[in-house]
Image: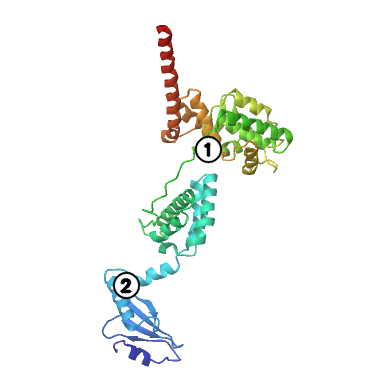
Amino acid sequence: MPKLTKRTIDAAKPDLMRDYFIWDDDMPGFGLRVLRSGMKTYQVQYRHGGRTRRNSIGKHGTITPDEARKIAKELLGRVAKGDNPAEERAIHRGASSVAEVCERFMKEYVPIHCKETTAKEYRRSVDLFIKPTIGTRKAPDIIRTDIAKLHHNLRDKPYQANRTLGVLSVIFNQCEIWGLRPDGSNPCRHVKKYTEKKRERFLSEEELKRLWDTLDNCEQEGTESAAACNTYRLLILTGCRLGEIQTLKWDYIKEDGIYLPDSKTGAKKVYIGQAVHDTLTKIKRAPDNPYVIPGTVKGQHLTDLQRPWRRIRSKAEINDLRIHDLRHSFASFGLSSGLSLAEIGKLLGHSQVQTTSRYAHLAEKITQKAAERTSGSILNSIEKLSV
């Protein structure tokens, strides 16, 4: 067996009847395979688990004999430590792409562990941001720099960048559970999220009056549906999330409140007052439809509430107001009426105190104003008595 050099390799002629091997005399297990077609490939051969294994290194001409020898030395060194490069390569060849893993994730994990709104957000991130960038790559090949680059390319949308990073982290955790990646190999680790500026927009009393009047006018003129207008009225009066009112059924409404079987924080009771009952009484029930906010499809709830909202807020001249800001405004008016943060958290159905704490600065402002009124009243009394 000669030493494999460029001269010996170039001299090797194909056998039209069969493939054959030339093994290197200096490095046992390192050789050259000569195919009947004339193609020549470098090989590493070893025994593992009582069986002979063979691993192709590369084509002659693409890599040099010295480069092939160096790779062979590294592979045989791994074999000596108990590794099995040929099997690892076979496993990698059959490994799922990121796109395939995403679909398995959406099919097996999401329906069991996620609510409908979360599932929609996951699907959006998968289809718009993950698949187009790394979908064709093998899932085991993704490294931290790939994730960091994807996250960086979304830097002009910090909220979306962070949500996509979160989705990827859950997906790669599942890859470890499914045995598609080694434990502790999640490439999303240590990729720092962008700072998100929390939007705080609260309706003033004048804006609230203008919005309420606009809702009445739009419904009376027929420019917007009664269902859409009633949705926004109930959001204003209850502080609920859009999905909670959108999917509200008549069966959930009781004298002492609204009992939601499911929400972002699970089953919960929404405390309501007479104003909500009066609003609900005015809503005409759609025949054979269990929803308070009926849609255009028989038996279903209204789905499109963003487009009518944009038209209504434009007429009310509050174009920067989001639907979710109605919930913030509910909290603001509650604090102004003397409620504590704990009571606001109870009304909004917060499961954690930290969530309600975002309104702490409003409570401080209200308390500051109360202090000013009180101290001013005391001073006025003193001045009157001094006259």
Q: What residue type is labelled 1?
A: Ser
Q: Which residue lies furthest to the front in this view?
A: 387
> Does residue 258 appear in this view?
no
Given residues 188 and 51, the one toward you in this image is 188
For the C terminus, the image quarter is top left
Given residues 43 and 293, the one toward you in this image is 293
Q: Residue at 44% across / 21% down in the picture?
A: 370
Given residues 319 and 226, the one toward you in this image is 319
* Residue 308, horizontal then vertical, whole percent: 65, 41
* Residue 296, horizontal then vertical, whole percent: 70, 42
Given residues 258 and 198, the one toward you in this image is 198
Q: Residue at 48% across / 59% down in the picture?
A: 101
Residue highlighted by disc 2: 48
Q: Residue at 26% across / 84% down in the picture?
A: 26
Q: What residue type is labelled 2?
A: His
Q: In which quarter of the view is residue 150 placed?
A: bottom left
Q: Residue at 31% across / 87% down in the picture?
A: 5
Which dot, 2 or 1, sits closer to the camera? 1
Q: In which quarter of the view is residue 273 placed?
A: top right
* Residue 7, horizontal then vertical, whole percent: 33, 91
Q: Disc 2 on helix, strand or loop?
A: strand
Residue highlighted by disc 1: 263
User: Badge 2 local density, few (<14 within 10 Å), some, or many (20+)?
Assistant: some
Q: Disc 1 on helix, strand or loop?
A: loop
Q: In which quarter of the view is residue 45 placed?
A: bottom left
Q: Which residue lies furthest to the right in this view?
A: 221
